[in-house]
Image: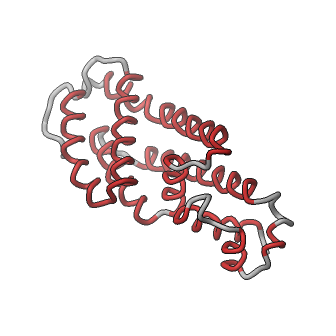
Amino acid sequence: MSSEKIKKAAIYYFAINGYEGTSLSQIAEKVGIKKQSIYSHFNGKDDLFLQVMNDALNQEICDLNTKIKQYPKSLKETLYDLLQDLMMRYENNVYMKFWLRMSFYPPGHLFDEINTAFYQYEREQKQLFLPLFKSAIKDNVLKKKNPEHLVIAFISLLNAITVELVYGGVERAKEVVDPSWEVFWDGIALATEGAKE
């Protein structure tokens, strides 16, 4: 039994049931081993959780990096597509579900480790978004504002949609994405042409 199979089962249960609602027995049963066998790969539930968290962090950074580099589109299309992608991944991606659940409902005794990972993710987001916003300002697509402030505003919009996903579900998030996007884009675009292309 590989540690990867154990982590795959663990992320599923942690994403659905949270840390407190997941037992090593459940994970062991899912992969067809005895609970004690988990200890040959991990020091315990905390170690397993933190390794799964690091996998989720790396996956989220990799996914965002890939999406940004794949988009040969305008900044407007790229950012709007990222909002739409956030909702789709919440429905279909266990790493995303785990990441969000862990961000909103962290086990108290692991708060510092989770907080460190969250801020690492936020730093990575800023580094990936900043060149896009700088380029759009240079190309007269966006108002001449501090690009770092624009990045923070967009990340705040992503975070607001995330709150809707976690507390209201995908349908509720869909209701707020377009109005929020329209106000955001109209506030930063040099020439407004509507929220969507």
Q: How is the image coloured?
A: secondary structure
Q: Quadrant of the N terminus?
A: bottom right
Q: Is residue 131 above or below residue 39?
A: above
Q: Does residue 184 appear to the left or right of 160 in the view shown?
A: left
In depth, the one of 142 and 5 nearer the eye is 5
Q: Quadrant of residue 165?
A: bottom left
Look at 37% across and 22% down and name the residue there. 149
In the rendered picture of this protein, how many numbered marks are placed on residues? 0
At 67% from the left and 45% from the top, the residue drawn is: 109
Frontmost residue, 59 versus 40: 40
Pick whichever, 42 or 196, lies toward us.
Answer: 42
Q: Is residue 14 above or below residue 37?
A: above
- Say which quarter of the image contains residue 95: bottom right
Q: Is residue 153 left or right of residue 36?
A: left
Q: Estimate the x, y position of residue 90 in percent, counting from the top left.
A: 42, 59
139 shown above or below 9? above
Residue at 31% in and 38% down:
75
